[in-house]
Amino acid sequence: MRDWAKTLRPASYRGVPFWVDYEDLSGGKRLALHEYAGGKRPVIEELGLMSKSFGVTMYLVSDLADVQALALEAVILADGPGLLIMPMDGGMLATAQDFRRSRAKDKHGYVGFDVTFIPALTAGGIVLSIGDLTATVANGFAAAAAQFAKLF
């Protein structure tokens, strides 16, 4: 049986890590439904695909969750697409559309976020920023170092 904990990637946006509680993907077709007076059947006109969107319920939990939440909020509000790494889907360029942050009085050290991401098209001209590349490389080195340390 597959060991999911070992095969899932650590989640992050623009290099800021977070944990994923729930995610969903929305998409579909844009349709124009034409209903005519006295008609027996509507005419359905397909207008192309809708933009996909990822709804992600994420959370931060640690003694530094308040500081991490500020960093996450800053990268969510940054201009343009950034590298979004999801545990099951891997990496993609995406723009954060909106977010909602939540905290509870009895959950100190826990900060929740609900964020909607719109994946960028795979068209040319979309490039990662230096910050995205640096954070991704740094996270990769940190993950490799952690795995290496387990050997000893």
Image (cartoon, grey):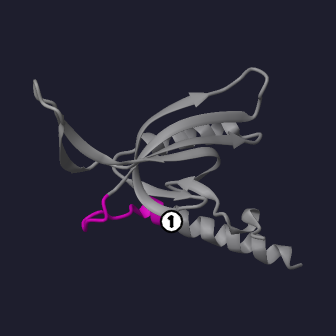
Q: Quadrant of residue 64?
A: top right
Please provide the residue range marked out in magenta: 121-134
Extreme residue toward the top, this view: 105
Where is residue 80 shown, x and y percent of the image?
33, 50
Tag 1: Cα neighbours inside 10 Å, few (<14), some, or many (≥20)? Answer: some
* Left or right placement of residue 114 versus residue 39 in this view: right
Q: In this view, does 152 lie above or below 3?
A: below
Q: What residue type is labelled 1?
A: Thr
Q: Residue at x 72, y 34 (%)?
A: 110
Q: Mark 1 points at which residue?
A: 134
Q: Which residue is drawn at 25% across and 44% down?
A: 30
Where is residue 139 shown, x and y percent of the image?
61, 65
Q: Does the magenta stretch include residue 123?
A: yes
Q: Is residue 52 magenta?
A: no
Q: Quadrant of residue 120?
A: bottom left
Q: Which residue is drawn at 73% across and 73% down?
A: 145
Q: In this view, does 71 lie above or below 145?
A: above
Where the C terminus falls, by quadrant?
Answer: bottom right
From the viewer's side, name the closer residue of 67 and 111: 111
From the viewer's side, name the closer residue of 130 and 102: 102
